[in-house]
Image (cartoon, rainbow, N blue to C red):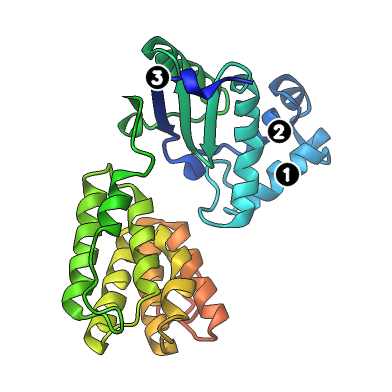
Amino acid sequence: MLNGYRKKYIVKADISNCFPSIYTHSLAWALVGKSEAKNKAGKNHQDEWFNQIDFYTRNLKHGETHGILIGSHASNLISEIILTAVDKTLYENYMYIRNIDDYTCYVETKEQAEEFLIELSTALKQFGLMLNHKKTEILKLPLASTENWVRKLNSFVFLNEDKLSLTEARAYLDIALDLMFHNKENSAILNYAISVLANKKMSKYAKDYFIKTVHHLVLIYPYLGSLLEKKIFHPFSIEVTEIKKIATDLLHLGKAKKLLEAMSYAIYFAIKYNFKIDGNHSASNQKMI
């Protein structure tokens, strides 16, 4: 057991495009080792349990070997197969926390911090993954116990808790977006801000502005699709016609930019809320989804 009180530096790192970068064949490498997996590759061994996991994972993206869907619980489980194999090479020598693809490591010296990044990078490359160097940093301890952006958002004073005004809703979201852009586009900031506002009672104008803003933001950051039901549709009793507009925009965006995540949310909403999305969205020239 490593003693945390002696640590003087903290390393923050995450994987570059983790889910889109996962190579499905590397699942077998993580499960049984690269040598055995390669020795048992091909049609003669397609019934091996680890090859079956690879096969069905590929089928999530029409047989493609690169990338898995973002946001689903199944994708989290799939990624854990690889990332726990990476953990196995590191955990005995380093004290760190991993939250999906985000790493926070505590070390005694800056040299150890650099060594951790080298070893983490090497371990990830074994499975075809890379560190996101834009979000990698070494910081000297002590740090504040709460993230600076959390304190800034929590310090915002809502003058009318009974019913939020348009001015307050706009100001709060503006602060959140500004904090996000100054914190390497940390998605947690936007998720946090939306969650806070979703629990507020709003005036009609504030509500309309909030919903339209989130509609706009989800087209910029499709991962926000996971928040729509619990934080927007249900709390604000959104009409199905409005949900259809969001789904339609997500589907068009996904088609134009080849973002399967955006398209999957659109199709899910169409099935869940029982509506059809107009337009031509398939090679067979279907007019409805």
Instruction: Determine the residue positioned at 46% across, 32% down.
Output: 104
- Residue wearing tag 1: 53
Disc 3 versus disc 2: distance between alpha carbons? 38 Å
The quadrant holding residue 196 is: bottom left
Identified by mark 2, the residue type is Ala
Name the residue nearer the viewer: 41 or 160: 160
* Residue in the picture at 38% in, 59% down: 191
* Location of residue 42 in the rendering, given as x and y in whole percent from the top left corner: 74, 33
Left or right placement of residue 95 versus residue 137 in this view: right
Q: Residues within 10 Å of mark 1 (few under 14, many from 20)?
A: some
In the figure, is residue 93 to the left or right of 207?
right
Q: Which residue is mark 3?
A: 8
Which element carries disc 3, helix, strand or loop?
Answer: loop
Q: Residue furthest top?
A: 111
Cα distance between the residues tagged 2 and 1: 8 Å
Residue 109 drawn above or below residue 42: above
Q: Earlier in the sequence, mark 2 or mark 1?
A: 2
Give the residue at x 54% y 72%: 268
**CB atoms of marks 1 and 3 within 8 Å:** no
* Residue 283 visible to the viewer: no
Sequence-wise, the earlier of marks 1 and 3 is 3
223 over 115 or under it: above or below? below
Mark number displayed over residue 28: 2
- The residue under label 1 is which amino acid type? Ile
Where does the N terminus fall, quadrant-wise? top right
Question: Element under label 1?
Answer: helix
